[in-house]
Image: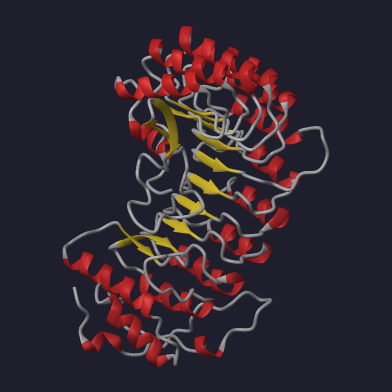
Amino acid sequence: MQRSPQQAGPESRTPPSAPSTTPTPAWAAADCSAAEPIGGLQEYYYELCMEKSQEIKPFILHILQEVDEEIEKGLVGITLNVAGNCHLMPVERVTGEDFWILCRILKNNPYINGLDVRYNLISDVGVSYAAKLLQKQHNLIYLNLMFNDIGPEGGELIAKALHKNTTLKHLRMTGNKIENKGGMFFAAMLQINSSLEKLDVGDCDLGMQSVIAFATVLTQNQTIKGLNLNRPILYGEQEESTVHLGHMLKENQCLVELHMCKHDIKNCGMKQLCDALYLNRSLRYLDVSCNKITQDGMVCLANVLKSNTTLEVIDLSFNRIENAGANYLSDALASHNRTLKALSVVSNNIEGEGLVALSQSMKTNPTLSNIYIWGNKFDEATRVAYSDLIHMGRLKSDNTDVEPFVVDGHVYLAEVSNGLKRHYYWTPGYGEACSPSSNAGFTLVPVGQYL
């Protein structure tokens, strides 16, 4: 629905102010609008920019035009995607000034429930307006702020805004250096907030103190279903993070998805997690990729898989389980486990013996549907085994990261762009960004409707 010209008049209220550490920009000295528009977003953006002498970004204008068209079709639940890493057209990244205007446009709009502004230049100045938006926009359920140069002060603003917010379900802070200070504010927020279901604070330079705080809070929080704690800044060799997160898993019966990539987990830490998984009855997706787990850790995991009936996706990519570890897993999958659906052993220094054993387990295990093996050492037996699985229909081509081809009578395997979370950091220049084949982990274990 288009706005009438009378709706574009100036407003008497003052705009959201910037954080106390940053002076309020001159362009935000006075707010504008009368009745909140529910359509004509492109026109409204143009008018706001003209009134504030703000540069009109063609990319934003184009995106708002597409949203207007969706609104005219009667669509609801729209995500406003102004990602700064779009490869399909020239992009001038959103600044704090641009973001203030976007927040004004989104406020009270009933058609839009998601905002994706990843890879922009919002910084702590712009994130103060996001905090105000969370307090006033009661339709927003998804907010993606990943890689926006947000620091500890900006993290504090967002975390405190969520104390009273009751609608947001999924927040991505990935790649913003909120550090230990910001992480503590988010952990404290989870003691109060009862609506957030998925939180991503991966690559945020969290310290051990905030990781422990998250683990402690989640022994009580019964709302969070997905948590990403990838790549904290940890010191020491005692694997404290796995001790505390393991204790949390024993107590928490609500968490469905846990990412612990780059936690420096070794076999002792893996044993701590496995001991907890004997008691946990909710976790379905475990990500321990990019750690230092070897075959001894797989002994513990294989024993868990013999009795665990909830785990459906396990990501072991970029460890070093080798042939022995693969054999332990294949034995458990072939004879005992009937719940695991997806397994990634990408780049684990596995040779033909272990890879063939995993392929053989799929012949007797009817549940395991997705397996990812690229980056290991393929021999002729491996190539033939996975080619046979694919050709006989036991392994669908969309459910693995290899594709067989024949040259001079010999079978080879080529890599294809499938995986558990292929588009976690980036979106493709063409095709569907959230396709099930590229993001199988999030498809098999859906927590929230967005990646």
Q: Left or right: 281 with respect to 444?
A: right
Question: How many marks do you count on the picture?
Answer: 0
Quadrant position of residue 34? bottom left
Q: Is residue 314 above or below residue 18?
A: above
Q: Residue at x 55, y 29 (%)?
A: 345
Q: Left or right: 148 with respect to 340?
A: right
Q: Left or right: 445 with respect to 250?
A: left
Residue lying furthest right? 236
Q: Is residue 373 above or below residue 144?
A: above
Residue lying furthest front? 408
Q: Residue at x 47, y 44 (%)?
A: 422
Q: Position of residue 88 (x, y in %)?
A: 37, 66
Q: Is residue 446 visible?
A: yes
Q: Position of residue 24 (x, y in %)?
A: 59, 84
Residue nearer the viewer, 440 or 208: 440
For the N terminus, which image quadrant? bottom left
Q: Residue at x 60, y 45 (%)?
A: 191
Quadrant position of residue 83? bottom left
Residue lying furthest top? 335
Residue nearer the viewer, 133 or 339: 339
Q: Position of residue 294 (x, y in %)?
A: 69, 24
Residue nearer the viewer, 103 or 423: 423
